[in-house]
Amino acid sequence: MTAIAENVIAKADQQHTADAVLRTELKQARGISREEGRAVSRAVFAYYRWLGWLDERLPMGERIARALGFDDTFRKNPASIKEADLHRAIPSWVSGHVNISVEWLRALQTEPTLWLRARMGQGKQLAEKLGLGPSGRARTRALPDAVVYEGGEDLFRTPEFQAGEFELQDISSQVVGMVCNPQAGGTWWDACAGEGGKTLHLADLMGGKGLIWASDRAAWRLQKLKQRTARAKVFNYRSVLWDGGAKLPTRTKFDGILVDAPCAGVGTWQRNPHARWTTTAEDVAELGAVQKKLLANAVQALKPGGRLIYSVCTLTRAETTEVKAEITRLYGNLEPLKLLNPLEPSAPASESVWLWPQTVSGNGMFICGWQARS
């Protein structure tokens, strides 16, 4: 198994993500069991999670073994890693861009939680069908259809998944849909839809009534969206290519627009430790400019009184508060929205919702929004 893990690490780089290479290598490996595949995956992700502690002069096999040792020790006793050493978990450039805490660094070194989103009102039933105990049920009343999965079954092969009864969707991504709060019969635009995870959630929240436009710059992502919507039996949407430019994909004016923009993905580093070592400060600056451009173009399609929601699974200031401040400064017809965090229902509404891995057991996420003045 170590040989496969070594191959993955040797082939992974900025253009070839470790998880994509891992899927290819496991698919090509002959006679490998599901348990062995999980062992390879754990070895690869442990290597990148503990890369800052490893001596690159050692043979790769020994480095992998040491990473797994760190992983085992940390699982049993998180305090075994001293606070001063925790900064090895991230590259040095991050300190100038993110408000770093010890709690966040410790969270980065833990195994991520696997979240499912059941169809509306079906969270309890789904947990029972999948044989999950009380720990698998929703952890917040605000998201009763969010389910934690801790089993070892291939979820994509379950009859429940094939029937469209659930999606694999991180809790923070589900929060974005709840913050959007689309109403039945409304018209929404998921401007950076990707493969459609948030499009599906918006459609479910709308009860299948109304219309959602889903756009992306990559045709293959929209093809994936088409497959997912067919399985989930979602039909109140239209998909269209959009490169993010000033020429909008439709003349439709929207009650709501979600710009879940491409970002540096710093909020996903617990789930995707390889990205810690391929993302750069230059990426952050470039993406911040892209995000401002996307919002500036998308806002032209907003109805008077419509809501523009901005979300990114990153935690850098250049992609969060600085983007928010720039759009607010440039567009006097946009009033910043006061948003409620559904995971903290007793907290007052705020112009920014921050989700951190150590507090939500999910990806880091930033959400803000504006309303177009009538």
Image (cartoon, helix red, strand yellow):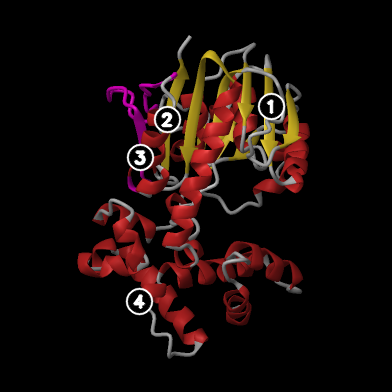
Which residue is pictured at 48% across the width and 79% down the height? 64
Q: Are marks 3 and 4 in contact (CB under 8 Å)?
A: no
Q: Nearer the viewer, mark 2 or mark 1?
A: 2
Residue on which disc 2 sits: 330
Which residue is pictured at 27% across the width and 53% down the height? 103
Tell me the crowding category of disc 1: few under 14, some 14 to 19, or many 20 or more residues within 10 angstroms, Cα based.
Answer: many
Tell me the crowding category of disc 4: few under 14, some 14 to 19, or many 20 or more residues within 10 angstroms, Cα based.
Answer: some
Whether residue 136 is visible, yes or no, is: no
Say which quarter of the image contains residue 123. top right
Secondary-structure class at tag 3: helix
Q: Is residue 118 above or below residue 92?
A: above
Magenta residue span? 333-358
- Left or right of residue 306, residue 214 in this image: right
Secondary-structure class at tag 4: helix
Q: Main secondary structure of the magenta part?
A: loop
Task: For marks 3 and 2, give the CA distance.
Answer: 14 Å
